[in-house]
Amino acid sequence: MESPPFDQPCPIRDVLDRIGDQWSLLVLDALARGTLRFNELLRAIGDVSKQMLSKTLKRLEQDGFVARRVYPEVPPRVEYALTDLGRSILEPMGQLVAWAEANHRAIVEARRRAAGGVA
Amino acid sequence: MESPPFDQPCPIRDVLDRIGDQWSLLVLDALARGTLRFNELLRAIGDVSKQMLSKTLKRLEQDGFVARRVYPEVPPRVEYALTDLGRSILEPMGQLVAWAEANHRAIVEARRRAAGGVA
DNA sequence: CGGGATCCCCGTAGATACTG
DNA sequence: CAGTATCTACGGGGATCCCG
């Protein structure tokens, strides 16, 4: 599956571009355990700004990964939950996470070896 | 937020940061079929600049994904090939690629539905 | 041929303030 | 509470030139 210079519809690149960013995976992971409100999500992830969380959620919602539920209450309440599509990507993601955990040490080691600690 | 190699609290984020960028996966994929030279890689990917390919390759090499082989010939020749580590990530990656291909349509559809309304 | 150095543009991410 | 708007800084990435 070679991609010519003008080839846009590469599914892999398209999908990876979405979930490969800094926050999408974290959000997906946070929501994997259950529905969360905006500020809960904010705190669950920790080092994400409101802006980025908002953008990320919007994109995830547009792509059909996340469902946004608004409750017309006096203190506004908005809940986010995974859709079936969102849940389904958790599996291949899990493979990658497992790989990452299993090989992280090897990577760090290779990196250190290359860095300067040639010794 | 760069953390030293020995102080990585989250392997997943660390690994994803590396292979989640625009080019690493494409390089890995290109090399999956066999050893390639710099310019071959450049053409195989198509829309990558020399600079980015160079940077990407260097990072992949430092992380132990790719092996760089220099031939001290008159017209310089440099070949890149996957290491065992590099080959091993192809599998979980494949899962993700398969998912991407299988669900790309659903995503595009959801995106379109969200974008311009149902029209 | 393989790639480093430089210049520059532009998207993106952070912080803050504001709104409903 | 749940966002949005603005302003700014940073750095990714392309193009080009140059060197081994």
Image (spheres, coloured by chain):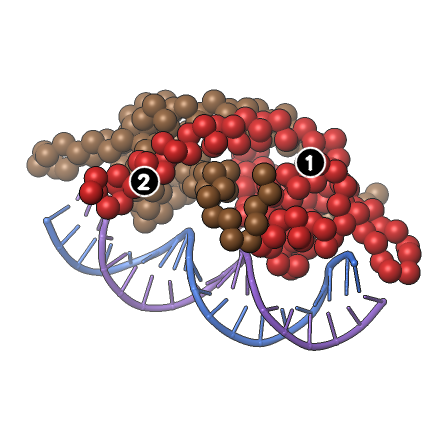
Chain colours: A brown, B red, C blue, D purple
User: Is A66 placed above or below B38 here?
Assistant: above
* Residue B68 horizontal side relative to residue A14, left or right: right
Where the N terminus of chain A falls, by quadrant? Answer: top right
| Residue A108 is at least partly visible in this image | no
At mark 1, the secondary structure is helix
Please identify the quarter of the rendering in which residue B28 is found: top right
Letter of the chain that mark 2 sits on in the rendering: B
* Residue B1 horizontal side relative to residue A70, left or right: right
The circle drawn on residue B32 is 1
Residue at 72% from the left image edge and 51% from the top image edge: B40
Please identify the quarter of the rendering in which residue A31 is found: top left
Number of other residues with Cα within 10 Å of mark 1, as a class: few under 14, some 14 to 19, many 20 or more: some
Q: Which of B4 and B27 is in front in this view?
A: B27
Q: Which residue type does callout 1 highlight? A: Ala
Count of labels in the image? 2
Which residue bears the numbered disc 2? B111
Sequence order check: which comes first, mark 2 or mark 1?
1
**Residue A12 on image: x %, y %:** 50, 38
User: Is D5 placed above or below B88 here?
Assistant: below
Residue at 64% from the left image edge and 59% from the top image edge: B51
**Residue B109 on image: x %, y %:** 32, 36
* Residue B38 horizontal side relative to residue B29, left or right: right
**Residue B59 on image: x %, y %:** 67, 48
Q: Nearer the viewer, residue B111 or B64?
A: B111
Measure the alpha-carbon separation of dots 2 and 1.
Answer: 31 Å
| Residue A47 is at least partly visible in this image | yes
Letter of the chain that mark 1 sits on in the rendering: B
> Outermost residue, right direction?
B73
Asked if labels 1 and 2 touch by Cβ distance under 8 angstroms, the answer is no
**Residue A119 on image: x %, y %:** 84, 43
> Outermost residue, left direction?
A74
